[in-house]
Amino acid sequence: MKKKAQYLLLLLASITLGSCSPELSPPENQAGRAPVAKVVADEGPEVPQQRTMQNPTVNASGNFSKNAGVSFSRVNVSGPYIALTFDDGPHPSLTPRLLNILKSKNVKATFYLVGKNVDAYPGIVRRAVAEGHELGNHSYTHRLYSKMSMAGMESEITKTNDSIVRAAGVRPRTLRPPYGGMTQKQRTYIHDKYGMPCIIWQVDPLDWKRPGASVVKSRIVNETTSGAIILAHDIHEGTVDAMAGTIDTLLAQGYKFVTVSQLISLGSRSTAAR
Ligand code: NI
């Protein structure tokens, strides 16, 4: 307190002496007023921090009917619902960082997991489930299904389902083939046998080419419409860097984030594609 008194005295002295110190007496202000205002501002209440935008909680069931459809790249919905999806993880550092961002904004996403990564980082998979995210199947070794035998593809899918159940106690309801490559025959076979629809995407920011966070964000924001399934990869730093701003912009535009299964449940039957 003694130092502050000395400072005020010095301040008064400098005003009286007509000091030209730019710190104490900005030229645009009347001498004698600006420095006092500065002291008051220093001691005033802190400006409240801007609140993080929050995604509204959508209470939609993820238990869609088996008749809903075999494949989706988007869903016809009557509200501003969109689904954000992340492929190829979990990644040991980027996925936890992404989970922090999603948590701060109450956004529930869908993770299309690679089975061998699930086996390597089961704790991250458990965390994703605990925080309300949905898990999907993205193969065990990330091979192109359309070039594989039916048995080979089925083995990739069942092995990954088993890994996810082992890690987090939940069974994926949907799958996404690596590179989006799955024949219609394969899609129908898996859907008939496991009830898992094949999820492609409407919005693709090509983030795997690492164009930088601002490009990832602008591509997603520009291409998203209601019912969109948005593709991204949580194994690229630029993608994770883009997410806070991307989510804030889409929330400001009125979109509501749901998981893929919720989006399908919210959709009209006419969406179903076979
Ligand atoms: Ni992939």
Image (spheres, rainbow, N blue to C red):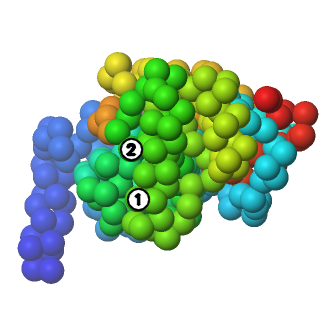
Please state which amino acid type lies under the numbered disc 2. Tyr
Image height check: is 87 above or below 42?
A: above
Foreground of the two, 12 or 4: 4
Residue 161 visible? The answer is yes
Residue 46 visible? The answer is no
Residue 120 x/y as whole percent: 26, 56
Foreground of the two, 266 or 224: 266
Confirm if mark 2 falls within 8 A of ligand 1: no
On the rendered image, what quadrant is the C terminus found in?
Answer: top right
Give the residue at x 67% y 37%: 189
Task: For marks 1 and 2, give the CA distance.
Answer: 9 Å
Residue 90 x/y as whole percent: 35, 50
Give the residue at x 80% y 29%: 273
Give the residue at x 18% y 66%: 8
On the rendered image, what quadrant is the N terminus found in?
Answer: bottom left
Q: Is residue 14 left or right of residue 145?
A: left
Please state which amino acid type lies under the numbered disc 1. Ser
Give the residue at x 32% y 34%: 236
Identify the secondary structure beneath mark 2.
loop
Q: Which residue is mark 2?
A: 140
Residue 39's tag is none
Asked where in the image residue 88 lies, by quadrant, the reply is top left
Q: Residue furthest bottom?
A: 1
Residue 105 x/y as whole percent: 53, 55
Q: Which residue is mark 1?
A: 163
Residue 228 x/y as whole percent: 68, 33
Circles 1 and 2: CB atoms closer than 8 Å: yes
Q: Residues within 10 Å of mark 1 (few under 14, many from 20)?
A: many
First in sequence, mark 1 or 2: give its number.
2
Image height check: is 20 above or below 180?
A: below
Q: Residues within 10 Å of mark 2 (few under 14, many from 20)?
A: many
Image height check: is 259 above or below 171?
A: above
